[in-house]
Amino acid sequence: MFSCFKPSLQVMKKLPTSCIPHPAFLFLLLSISTFSQSLTSYVNPFIGTREMGHTFPGACLPFGFVQLSPDTDTIPYDMDGKYNPPVYRYCAGYQYDDKTIVGFSHTHFNGTGHSDLGDFLIMPTAGPLQLNPGTAAHPEQGYRSAFRHETEKAEPGYYKVHLDDPDVDAELTTTLRCGFHRYTFPKADSARIILDLIHGIYNYDGKVLWAYVRVVNDTLITGYRITSGWGRNRYMYFALAFSKPFDVYGWRNADKPVYRGFWRRFSQYSNFPEMAGKKIRAWFGFSTFKGEQVKLKIGLSAVSMEGAIANLQAEIPGWDFDKIRSEAHENWEKELSRIKIEMPGSRVKGHGSRDTSFYTAFYHVLMNPVVYQDVDGKYRGIDQEIHQAVGFVNYTTFSLWDTYRALHPLLTWLYPQRSGDMVSSMLAHYDQSAEKMLPVWSFHGNEDWCMTGYHSVSVIADAWVKGVRNFDPEQALRACVATSANKYYEGITDYMKLGFVPLERSASAASVTLEYAYDDYAISRFAEAVAEDSASGTLLQMLAGAETSKYLKRSENYKNVLDRRTGFMRPKNADGTFKPAFDPLSTSNQGFIEGNSWNYSFHVPQDIPGLITLMGGDKVFVSRLDSLFTMHLDDKYFAETEDVTRDGLIGNYVHGNEPSHHIPYLYNWTSQPWKTQAMIHKIINSMYKNAVDGLCGNDDCGQMSAWYIFSTLGFYPVCPGTDEYSIGSPCVSKATVSLPNGKTLTIIAKNLSENNIYIKSVTLRGKSLIGLVIHHKDLMEGGLLLFGMSDRH
Amino acid sequence: MFSCFKPSLQVMKKLPTSCIPHPAFLFLLLSISTFSQSLTSYVNPFIGTREMGHTFPGACLPFGFVQLSPDTDTIPYDMDGKYNPPVYRYCAGYQYDDKTIVGFSHTHFNGTGHSDLGDFLIMPTAGPLQLNPGTAAHPEQGYRSAFRHETEKAEPGYYKVHLDDPDVDAELTTTLRCGFHRYTFPKADSARIILDLIHGIYNYDGKVLWAYVRVVNDTLITGYRITSGWGRNRYMYFALAFSKPFDVYGWRNADKPVYRGFWRRFSQYSNFPEMAGKKIRAWFGFSTFKGEQVKLKIGLSAVSMEGAIANLQAEIPGWDFDKIRSEAHENWEKELSRIKIEMPGSRVKGHGSRDTSFYTAFYHVLMNPVVYQDVDGKYRGIDQEIHQAVGFVNYTTFSLWDTYRALHPLLTWLYPQRSGDMVSSMLAHYDQSAEKMLPVWSFHGNEDWCMTGYHSVSVIADAWVKGVRNFDPEQALRACVATSANKYYEGITDYMKLGFVPLERSASAASVTLEYAYDDYAISRFAEAVAEDSASGTLLQMLAGAETSKYLKRSENYKNVLDRRTGFMRPKNADGTFKPAFDPLSTSNQGFIEGNSWNYSFHVPQDIPGLITLMGGDKVFVSRLDSLFTMHLDDKYFAETEDVTRDGLIGNYVHGNEPSHHIPYLYNWTSQPWKTQAMIHKIINSMYKNAVDGLCGNDDCGQMSAWYIFSTLGFYPVCPGTDEYSIGSPCVSKATVSLPNGKTLTIIAKNLSENNIYIKSVTLRGKSLIGLVIHHKDLMEGGLLLFGMSDRH
């Protein structure tokens, strides 16, 4: 059934939160759908904007650094480190249920469970000067404005809303490094643009270390700020141009400034071209006639104000908003067109359009990593120096614990050049890091050490094994080896000595051990491939050969935390004894992170047959999987589960968090692979809805969405770092994938319907697959991947 | 009489504060003085280190950016803007009466009345780890150490002291951009180097916006900090190399850091190679044998850590401390040798060696401005961008209200190339400034707007008029014109409209008007000279011609604040009425800054004959001068006088502040020029002593010292911007000046003695002077300037 969200551009501005479509409306939509429709029109940027999804509806380009979006609130952080739900709630700056917009800021994360950014908030106002944002309850006390969703329109690269209080239409579009605002004002004697340099996401009193604004002339200002938020020390510069000269301007410093005698002698707060301090809010005023459009364009740079100006000049030389919007639209259309899908005749009921879910997922997939360099190739490194990217494009925002699983494999498949650039970016990070460590959770020249594992190695291995060659294998291998032997990082020294990370070293000792063992396998696959690709007898070949066996051995370390008596993974103390008083259902203080032992016990993607044997064989293993998906998780345990809604659970399986993402595919290694097929459809149908609360957990920088893309197409990279995809069950009747090598892969799920979800046969280019596996190389040859679907397994 | 300070290198380490020389000691010194002695040995860096002088005794090069000196305390600033004497007391970080040394920091101002810097404090310790400085009363509670002056030795480019608490000999020397430390340790199992990134001068809680340290390896660390002190936003980077590897290291953050989950998982405070936060103190530990010398060398840069490393590699490639010390010594020797003086046979009694006073003054003169660019020419501009200095060396630290009077004229005379580079630095500042304004009081990429006037124009005019040509005259003239019409700056708009700055616009309305009028005259001189030097009919010639007359007219504006009824300068209200209830003796709220109307009423260097006429003619004028020098200033008024000691007054004449520096020379324009001659000797003999409290006020970035150099040689630039020096009375029997054009000027004061201070004749190259004036061009021809001295006027 079509959702009321299934939209033309014109319809999308109406976005009710409950879906009771009027019959005539449905008819209209169905009529439209018979025409060839742009793929961007299937994207609903509002999916995931209520509660847990942590997506934002604003404008951006694929891999675009500037992600310009309305912030409906950003609650100050509780400095005591206490879990502060309102902060978490505003990771993306936008919550669908809010009634007011504070303003529009230019940097956002998509779907994270931690947060930062929200740089350079801009808000148009009319009326008395208010230099504080006010509150959601009392927007009239500040510059924020009430708004209504019916005035909102969001599409890839474009966002529009009517701001009720100043009676201003706000439109936003972007290029890679720049934001473009178009505000349609009422008649106003005192129209103003507010530039709030205090505003930010993951805010706390003192986050802004320093802010600076320079009025270059009456249509150009530059500036920067340095923040210490989640990113410990982040620099962001801007150049902001106005289409209309401001007549008058000023600022306030909400901080108590240092005593400086000179201000006794002339005023700095009005029409004085420099503003600086920790808590700056500036304004720029002019008068407007009714319907006057005032445009702003802003270039961002992590390097310098000069860099921001150059970015702006290069990307938005003129003032044609519609042209930039149109270019953004075409850019998205081009990327989304890499996969064209068709739905089965009878659509899956209940959760809206699969087209919209699919293309919105694809849209979210392409929202990060983002390009992190100026137009001249300069960027700010993790060593806090300015670097020149030579031979690659530098990217940032690596949420690797999430994204190594499916997002990076998806990018490696569809964007091998970008994937190689991302690897080169990671290697630059490694070179520049004081700890000689590949990224863990890094963004904007900062390493946040968030979550666990050294999963950069998985991304590198996966890229190389799948044929990505635009990075240096020797440098990469040395970086992987050094990272996996890092003496500073969580328990690695003990891990290398004991074969497991002991509880004394890490509260996540068991899951960390499992992740290290998997990562080690990825290194061994990478090393083996490099050895094969290297000239015989070279130093690199010998190095790679030696690392292959060493890391293959290390990859068996998962066995060291398997309690064979119970079949559960269980953390050990340094003396080799298992943690006593162990609860495999709990995620709290049991030696795992964001998951319980029930889920993590399946976390051996590198040796599933071995795991099955150790757990007691096929029957026991199937039974354990069945239990996972059917048992009831007590509220007590659910309360410990981070980042997911109740809907994000199937039994004790937690789709809203990542550690379990491969588990539905594990039936493939048992006697009952049909259960994988059923489970994929169940998850697809229940966990991804075309609705503002359509995501069952954080999108996690596109990992949730990438899972959806792969699984919808019928296969999934269960063990990145190998060239294998495991067959699931396709959820589209046809998909046409334009491969990056110019070939075309056509996927057809013959007879797919709501009930025909089981696979009777799979052929690739006419040949049956051997096992439920497709190799990457075969996939890249293109041709027809034909699934024969049935209602019986 | 020789002072006990008159030293060989060996003797200088003994620096008693009261001077009762033992006869044998005197004999020794007198014997030595018959040999040719190095001029550096005449420098006593301790002059001015007690109370008001605000000098520091540490090591530096001429014009050296790094000025490495012990800080005996740095009292936190009172944020409420209240006058806080202890802060003021520590402008240079060192007070002679203190008994403890906190550590050694690398940047200092010489003799300022406001403060900042104190970057990168290093302190050697032995014993238990203490990561706070402790207090002067309880040094044992922190890492600071007691010390005794008898262990101190200070000479140009070198400083030594014994730190009693750790029992460490500390020695310091420098290059332009680097500091070099040599510490001789006792046997110690836990010797440590403390690096305190909180420490600084003009400190307050929150001054350090951010600090960062990176342990590159066990002998190299890099880092930086950003401070908001007097310099509103100052960046300083370092690279610090150890001659001995540290075994262990750590840090503490005295700030409450932002909550960041990752630190749960591994410790950042011990042997972790990155440290960052607002309040960092780090330590680096090793064991030492008795007498072991551990050396540190540190490069500074305002650009980047990479820049700091490059500076260090270029300037101190090896570890030879004595070599660097010796090079520093030679560097000073070379500069001080530009002027060689001889004393009269019977020396002036009472205030120690004139040699020492002279060469210490010369030493202080050469301590700023300082070179402010990396070895590759990069520097951080006032616009907070990184620039490349092309065609000039970039300098910083311009305390122009002080230094335009004599310091810059002295540098222009002796160092025309550097003077031109300083002008180019000012022009770069102008170009980069948001306000399009030449420097007022600028340092390290910051404008502090301290004090009044736009005296950069005086420096520029003086340089050009005296033949300095290595800057662009058109750019300079345009910068002067724009600066003097700046709409943001103190009352200029009204000044241009009304002919004076009204009290409504400035609390210093009268003195500001006087300074603007003088500065305008300087511009007119500059413009006239440029017009003369320009090709006929060029745009530049026309521009310069127009500005000449315009600014000559503006220079008469001093008349607008002269109350002809009383002969006193007196501030006006905007309506043209004089301020009622006016007290010409008071410096408080009377319309003047750092001076009263009595002194400022003589502040018309550009039109002294005109002033004399307006004041009532020669007799009245002489009588007013006499009164100034003889009247008693009530304690009530003295209490209002900033920055000077009681000794800094002669009557109501305040030598310790600058506005009166030219006044002793004004008798030259009257019928009684002998009074100038007497007064010069009186000031020289009473205001400059070879003693720790030898300066009667702040040295003010060398202005007090430059006055001394000129006046000692017998002439003074009463009106910079003209090519005239006014004759005073020489205080040396002979001086040989190596002019920068290769010629030699020999000054002889024939028959000079304690009583023979009056000039009977002056000839230059055998020709009598016309009037009591020497023209710069004539001076630069060299030859003999012969004064015939007498005891009668």
Image: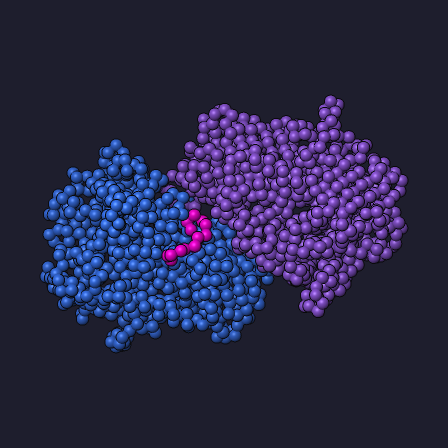
Chain colours: A blue, B purple
Which residue lies at the image location 72% right of the left edge and 30% below the top edge?
A: B35
Q: Quadrant of the N terminus of chain B?
A: top right
Which residue lies at the image location 30% right of the left edge and 66% below the top edge?
A: A336
The answer to which quarter of the image holds residue A617 is top left
Q: Does residue A475 appear anywhere in the picture?
A: yes
Q: Residue B21 at x, y = what percent?
A: 73, 25
Q: For this view, does B38 lie left or right of residue A647?
A: right
Which residue lies at the image location 44% right of the left edge and 56% below the top edge?
A: A378
Query: What segment carries the magenta color?
Result: A379-393
Q: Main secondary structure of the magenta part?
A: loop
Q: Residue A509 at x, y = what percent?
A: 28, 40
Q: Is residue A385 magenta?
A: yes
Q: Residue B287 at x, y = what percent?
A: 45, 28
The answer to which quarter of the image holds residue A172 is bottom left
Q: For this view, does A201 lie left or right of residue A584?
A: right
Which residue lies at the image location 66% right of the left edge and 43% below the top edge?
A: B366
